[in-house]
Amino acid sequence: MDDTLPVFVYGTLLPGQWYWSRINRWVDRWEPAEVHGKLYDTGLGYPAAAFGPEGRIYGVLVHFRPGTHEAARDVIDEIEGEGTEYRRVEVETISGTKAAAYEWIRDPSALAQVMSPWRPIEQQVSDPDAANP
């Protein structure tokens, strides 16, 4: 996989979410994006993605400044538990852009599927207008 690919994010790494502040110093720009797959509730306060031909996951394509990809990837790998909880994979957005993304390693069939875009549970409870469509 090309280490300079943008990264597709769909949960706690989204702009304004818990871990955005850990990567935003390297961000050049970001844009809304969609990929094929399904989103699941881990029950741990963050979502899990299973990329595949069915469904759509709405998120953001994050483009990093030149020379910062490795530092950003290392932080994201740490956040995502790359290799233990998630694996870094290459996906293609609906518009045809190749990107890195993080896919849940475990079988998601025991998890509840959620509608995309993902919202933190506290936002779903406290703001009925922010609930998943």
Image (tube, helix red, strand yellow):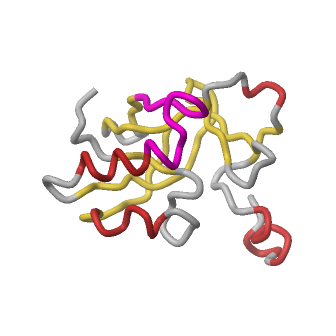
On screen, residue 74 versus residue 110, left or right, reads: left
**Residue at 66% of width from left, 50% of height from top?**
116
**Residue at 51% of width from left, 28% of height from top?**
83
Above-or-below relation of 25 to 35 = below
Q: Is residue 74 magenta?
A: no
Image coordinates for residue 124, horizontal then vertical, percent: 79, 67
Image coordinates for residue 29, horizontal then vertical, percent: 29, 64
On screen, residue 98 versus residue 2, left or right, reads: right
Say which quadrant the N terminus sits in.
top left
Image coordinates for residue 41, horizontal then vertical, percent: 76, 44
Image coordinates for residue 129, horizontal then vertical, percent: 77, 75
Above-or-below relation of 62 to 5 = below
**Residue at 56% of width from left, 24% of height from top?**
53
Say which quadrant the C terminus sits in.
bottom right
Q: Is residue 88 magenta?
A: yes
How many marks on residues?
0
On screen, residue 64 versus residue 42, left or right, reads: left
Q: Residue furthest left?
A: 66
State the residue in front, 120 or 31. Answer: 120
Q: Which residues are magenta?
A: 77-89
**Residue at 32% of width from left, 52% of height from top?**
72
State the residue in front, 113 or 27. Answer: 27
- The quarter of the picture where residue 101 lies is top left
